[in-house]
Amino acid sequence: MSTASQLLKQHLQQRQMLGKTHVSLRPGTMEKLTGVGRPPAARAVPEPEPSRSFAAAPAPAARALRDSPPSETKKAELLEVAGATVEEKLAALRTMAETWEPALSMSSLRKTMVFAVGSPLASLMFVGEAPGAEEEKLGEPFVGPAGQKLTAIIKAMGLDRRKVYISNICKFRPAMDNQGSGNRKPTAEEMRACVPFVLTEIDLVKPLVIVALGATAAEGLGIPGTVGGLRGRFHATSGIPTMVTYHPSYLLREEQTGDGIRAKRAVWEDMLKVMEKLGLPISEKQRRYFQTK
């Protein structure tokens, strides 16, 4: 596909996400569009028609993304990006996210885009819900207190944060009145506006296992329910085994109430299952982490 036609397709995808079904064209534009990327026709081109609107029903995938509940967002259309390697395609996806009109047009979302971080060759992918204050400031997911907790979990698994892939369902921080450092979970509409990016990331990176951090992340991946009801067993996202567990911020809250060990053990049991699925070595010491005596 030529660069011009690819840019056109991306623009139309954004307009479909916004619910637009018509595009106004100048005289002769339709004829030019139908000739993009094709050799000149042997026959004469008809005279340009008067200005008209080109009407087309939204693609089924775009309709599903715009109208379906978050539990069905995994049916959304993947975004098409240019590039010869996964790294190049992820870079192109980041650029697309920075000007993604379906999200930027929402007054309920702030305007700083926070993309994913990590290895494009990762076997393990973590998905959260949305960036917070620190993430928005530094432009990287999971760098605040919850991010430090996630990094500790990754290290306890015997892994390096730089070798996994970390993303969010929503690429923009949900806005609040008198925001300050406060955060809120993204709405279903906000998730629908952004979820094509994380689904495309999954398609490009192709991790062996996904960990959904919290019920909102699970919902965005098409796995509705409570963490308590979903954790402890594998689900599937685009055919990839997906473990739902508590968000690191939940662990921080539980530590403040004095029930941190129980919550940590629950998350760690989920991570042990992830490690087993990945074929990672597990020591007896690791198996006993956070066990109560």
Image: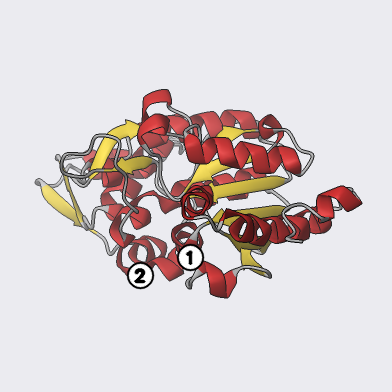
Q: Amino acid at mark 1?
A: Lys
- The number of numbered badges drawn on the structure is 2
Report how far apart the C-alphas of labels 2 and 1 lie in the structure. Answer: 9 Å
Q: Name the residue carrying label 1.
A: 75
Q: Which mark is residue 187?
A: none
| Label 1 secondary element | helix
Examine the rendering and report whether any part of residue 110 can be seen: yes
Quarter of image, res 120: top right
Q: How is the image coloured?
A: secondary structure
Residue positioned 64% across, 54% down in the render: 210
- Label 2 packing within 10 angstroms: few (<14), some (14-19), many (20+): some
Quarter of image, res 165: top right
Q: Quadrant of the C terminus?
A: bottom right
Near-viewer residue (34 or 268): 268
Near-viewer residue (111 or 34): 111
Near-viewer residue (50 or 141): 141
Residue occupying the far left of the picture:
50
- Label 1 packing within 10 angstroms: few (<14), some (14-19), many (20+): some
Residue positioned 21% across, 47% down in the render: 108
| Label 2 secondary element | loop
69 over 120 or under it: above or below:
below
Examine the rendering and report whether any part of residue 2 can be seen: no
Q: Position of residue 133 (x, y in %)?
A: 35, 34
**Mark 2–mark 1 CB contact (< 8 Å):** yes
Position of 138 compared to 100: left or right?
right
Near-viewer residue (271 or 86): 271
Q: Name the residue carrying label 2.
A: 68
Q: Position of residue 189 (x, y in %)?
A: 29, 59
Q: Position of residue 50 (x, y in %)?
A: 9, 46
Q: Position of residue 94 (x, y in %)?
A: 46, 32
Q: Amino acid at mark 2?
A: Ser
